[in-house]
Image: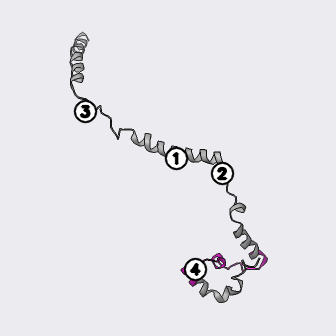
C-alpha cells in the first residue's frame, strides 16, 4: 500500500507538467461543434422550443384547438340536410355539387350527367 502511494506521488508531478506542456488541441480540449450529447441537447431542444412557442402563441391569441364540425364545415352539413330531405339523391357524389372541378372530376361528371344532371345546381338555388 505504501509503495502504491509512493508511485502515485512520484507520477503526479510528471502528469501535471505534461498537461501544462501539451497544447490544448492535442488533449482534445478545444471547442467542438459535435460533442457527444449534441443530438439530445440541440435537436430535441429545438423541437421542444418550436412546440412550446406554438403553444404559447395559441394561448396568447386564444386559439381553440378543439374539433368542432359545426364551426368549420357548414357547407357539408347543408349538403347532408338536402340529401336527408330528398332534394339531392343520397348516392350523388359530393364533387358533382362543387363549382370548381379538375379534369378527372369533369370526366366523371360528364359520364354521370344523365343520372345526376337535374341535381347539379341544387346548391346554387338558395
Residue under pointer 4: 105
Whole-angstrom CA distance, mark 1 to mark 2, is 17 Å
Given contact means CB atoms under 8 Å apart, are the residues at marks 1 and 2 in contact?
Answer: no
Please say whether residue 104 is one of the residues in the magenta stretch: yes
Q: For residue 50, which numbered disc appears in the image?
A: 1
Region in magenta: 83-107
Residue under pointer 3: 25
Residue under pointer 2: 63
Pointer 2 or 4: first along the chain: 2
Mark 2 or 4, which is nearer the eye?
2
Whole-angstrom CA distance, mark 2 to mark 4, is 35 Å
Pointer 1 or 2: first along the chain: 1
Q: Residue furthest bottom?
A: 114
Please determine whether, in this image, residue 19 is positioned above or below residue 92.
above
Q: How many neighbours does mark 4 have within 10 angstroms: few (below 14), some (14-19), or many (20 or more)?
A: some
- Whole-percent x and y of residue 54? 57, 48
Q: What residue is drawn where x is 34% and y is 40%?
A: 33
Lateral position of residue 113 relative to residue 46, left or right:
right
Q: How many neighbours does mark 1 have within 10 angstroms: few (below 14), some (14-19), or many (20 or more)?
A: few
Q: How many neighbours does mark 3 have within 10 angstroms: few (below 14), some (14-19), or many (20 or more)?
A: few
- Whole-percent x and y of residue 99? 64, 77
Pointer 3 or 2: first along the chain: 3
Pointer 1 or 4: first along the chain: 1
Circle 2 SS class = loop
Amino acid at each position: 500500500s505504501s509503495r502504491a502511494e509512493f508511485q502515485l506521488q512520484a507520477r503526479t508531478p510528471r502528469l501535471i507538467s505534461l498537461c501544462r506542456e501539451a497544447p490544448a488541441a492535442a488533449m482534445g480540449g478545444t471547442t467542438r461543434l459535435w460533442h457527444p450529447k449534441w443530438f439530445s441537447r440541440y435537436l430535441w431542444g429545438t423541437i421542444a422550443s418550436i412546440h412550446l412557442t406554438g403553444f404559447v402563441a395559441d394561448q396568447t391569441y386564444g386559439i381553440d384547438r378543439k374539433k368542432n364540425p359545426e364551426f368549420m364545415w357548414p357547407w357539408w352539413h347543408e349538403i347532408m340536410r338536402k340529401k336527408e330531405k330528398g332534394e339531392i339523391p343520397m348516392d350523388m357524389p359530393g364533387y358533382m355539387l362543387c363549382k370548381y372541378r379538375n379534369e378527372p372530376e369533369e370526366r366523371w361528371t360528364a359520364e354521370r350527367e344523365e343520372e345526376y344532371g337535374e341535381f347539379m345546381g341544387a346548391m346554387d338555388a338558395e
